[in-house]
Image: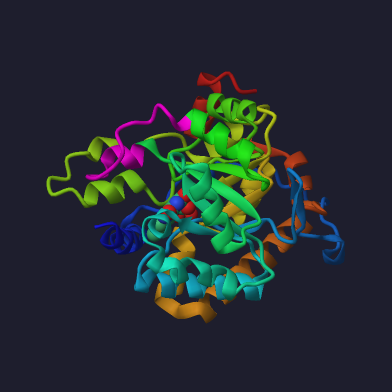
Amino acid sequence: MSAQRKDDHVRLAIEQQDTRSGINQFDEVSFVHHALAGIDRPQVSLGTSFAGISWQVPLYINAMTGGTAKTGVINRGLATAARETGVPLASGSVHAYLKDPACADTFSVLRRENPDGFVMANVNATASVADTRRAIDLLEADALQIHVNTAQETAMPEGDRSFGSWVSQIEKITAAVDLPVIVKEVGNGLSRETVLTLRQLGVRVADLGGRGGTDFARIENGRRPLGDYGFLHDWGQSTAACLLDAQDAGLPVLASGGVRHPLDAARALALGASGVGASGVFLRTLLDGGVEALIAQIANWLDQLAALQTMLGARTPAELASKDLLVHGTLRTFCADRDID
Ligand code: FNR
């Protein structure tokens, strides 16, 4: 059942890429154009540092898959693209391996194909400390992602219905492992209050994982015979809204969920993200065009992000955060409702 679920996720995520509108709240963020702000391209760097982590580029391939033969092939492609472009990448939930070590290769390929890259291991918030260590060891991981996904679990036919232990388990894992811990949502967003709680728990980074891209409640509802959890579609806050909400929460944030192109990445960095992740868009490119197409897409995104920084006068991704932005429409209403200046 679990193995089938992994293949279902890939199929349904790709179906969403093909059928969803493509509009999201990043469209309500624009840079004020200053015609004389530009700098010289050689002055621009893409490097980013946060929470003791340094990346050469501020873009990463976020958590997706592993556990079946088919998803092992996908992971090989993702790892090859990461190696060739220098982007960090995260594994899919390593839960499948923890339950059945026979599928180890479908995850460890992420490290084998990408021996010098920055690799994040991904577990859920009920993983034991011992299992978390097994996941980290399997991938020789540089950081740990713990995913939180109550809306997905609720819509999932075989999902968890008990969430009360998550806070204490995140605290336990964070205290026990030596690596930086990143807590991530899967597309419903982390609120300011949640980010403040994570900070108190000792978590080093929040990956805001907001609404606007792959919608996991929709994916799980698509797996229900009656499809009767449609009311959870589009649940939560967008990534742009989460970035505004978490501005003064005192924790470095990563932005993922609905990042469609380099301009969205620049917008997210300008809204305070230290790095920007994408999943569904990259998966689609890999499955449609193969690994060469994914390498070309990521290289192009990085080149275009540097071009935007050159035009906007930002020598580093961090400098984008001091550029003038306009926030329009429903995102502006969100700021007013949440008392965000
Ligand atoms: C995911 N995502 C995910 N996240 C996670 O923490 N653990 C996981 O195992 C998975 N599995 C998974 C499978 C597939 C096929 C996709 C497309 C995505 C969620 C992912 O990391 C990300 O948070 C969301 O997909 C939102 O980002 P995009 O797709 O809008 O860029």
Residue 14: x %, y % from top left: 35, 63
Give 194 or 282, whichever is nearer the viewer: 194
User: Which quadrant holds residue 139?
Assistant: bottom right
State whether residue 256 appears in this view: no
Tell which residue pokes out farthest to the left in this image. Answer: 226
Give 210 or 224, whichever is nearer the viewer: 224
Q: Is residue 157 magenta?
A: yes
- Give the residue at x 74% y 45%: 50
- Give the residue at x 82% y 50%: 37
State whether residue 219 appears in this view: yes
User: Which quadrant holds residue 263?
Assistant: bottom right
- Give the residue at x 27% y 48%: 220
Residue 195: x %, y % from top left: 58, 30
User: Which quadrant holds residue 200?
Assistant: top right
Residue 248: x %, y % from top left: 68, 27
Tell which residue pokes out farthest to the front in this image. Answer: 130
Report the quarter where the C terminus lies: top right
Q: Indicate left or right for 93 with 316 as reference.
A: left
Q: Which residues are magenta?
A: 151-166
- Give the residue at x 46% y 34%: 237
Residue 290: x %, y % from top left: 46, 79
Give 27 or 190, whichever is nearer the viewer: 190
Report the quarter where the N terminus lies: bottom left
Q: Is residue 321 magenta?
A: no
Above or below, comparing residue 105 to residue 147 in the picture: below
Q: Main secondary structure of the magenta part?
A: loop
